[in-house]
Each structure stands twice: as structure tokens, then as C-alpha cells.
Amino acid sequence: MNKITVRPFKHDDIETYRGWVNDPAIGRLLGRIEPVTKAEHERWYERLIDNINVRVFAIEVNSEYIGNVWLWNIEKAHRKAEVRIVIGLRQGQGYGTQALDIITKYAFGKMNLNRLYAYVFDYNKRAQNAFETSGFIKEGFLKSDRFINGEYVDTYIMARVKE
């Protein structure tokens, strides 16, 4: 398996990312219901980049952009943040786990956070496995938490604390 690298997410990445979000299989994993327009995605990117409580990174394998990993809703006072990840290309090869390891090291080290958490849909077994392999545990279960494509979806809360 190739090693991944992460770099800042940039404007040049957004059309590729929008393509992943609009892919029905990937969109389902993200909880997307409607396709994302170019204008909507531009506004999302501008808000994302301007948000001081977010750190977003592009994931690359051999300089190929394959996904994103980010810290969302960073709460410095409580030293915690939500982790979000999407792998758009080369799924199922362990790259998500590697990206989670990198973002965890960054969050616990450089940012001095103490707790990371994620919301993972019950049907996303690949994401559950990646988080568990990266040391996250299932802390909670939210029954019928989301309504996606006409059905209620259960969600796990997965978390890891600084060692």
C-alpha cells in the first residue's frame, strides 16, 4: 500500500470534490440528499475556508487527490473537534485509516486537542473499520438519527481521546 500525504484543501480541488459528493454511492455515505450545484459548492468552500473552527486537508496518494479529511467544529475551550473524512477515489485500500492517523496526530499534537469524535452511519462499515483501526471506539448509538433517501438511518458516535 502506498503512503498518503495531506496538504491544505484548495480552490482547485472543489470541482473534483463536488463530483464525489454528487456521486450517489459517495453522497449516501455523506448523507447528501440533493445534488450540489456549482454555485452552492462555491459558497460552501468560501464559508469553509473563512471558518476559524475548521481545518480541512486534501488527501493525496502519489500526488493524486483522493479525498478530504478535516476537523470540524473545533472547540478550543473544551479541546475537542469532530473529524470528517471522505475518500472519493481508491476506496477500500486503507487510505482512510492513514488519513485518520495523520489528522489525529495533528489534532492531539499541534492543536493540543484532547478529544476527537465522529458521526458514522450504521451502514458505512468501511468507515467504522477505519475509525476503529485508528483507535476510535463506539461511544454511542443514535437510533433513526438521520432521514436519507426515504429511510431513517442509525448513527454511531465514535471517539478517541488523547493518550
Image (tube, grey):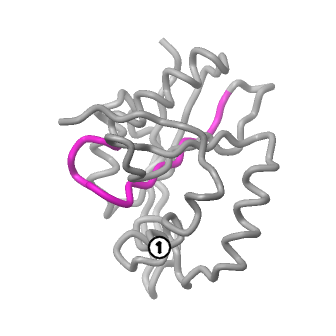
Q: Residue 78 at what x, y percent from top left?
A: 74, 26
Is-magenta flag for residue 86? Answer: yes
Relative to 100, is 61 on the left or the right?
left
Label 1, secondary structure: give it: helix
Relative to 106, is 90 on the left or the right?
left
Q: Residue 18 at what x, y percent from top left?
A: 53, 70
Q: Residue 39 at what x, y percent from top left?
A: 72, 79
User: Does residue 103 lie above or below 49 as drawn?
Assistant: above
Q: Residue 106 at what x, y percent from top left?
A: 55, 23
Name the outermost residue toward the bottom.
150
Q: Quadrant of the N terminus?
A: top left
Name the outermost residue toward the top.
163
Label 1 is placed on what type of residue?
Gly
The residue identified by callout 1 is: 19
Report the front residue among 147 and 92: 92
Q: Residues within 10 Å of mark 1 (few under 14, many from 20)?
A: some
Report the front residue among 77 and 26: 26
Which residue is depicted at the point 60% across and 58% down? 12
Which residue is depicted at the point 49% across and 27% down? 104
User: Does residue 84 lie above or below 147 as drawn?
Assistant: above
Which residue is depicted at the point 66% across and 71% down? 41
Which residue is depicted at the point 61% across and 20% down? 114
Please give the range of residues in magenta.
80-96
Is-magenta flag for residue 102? Answer: no
User: Does residue 26 lie above or below 112 as drawn?
Assistant: below
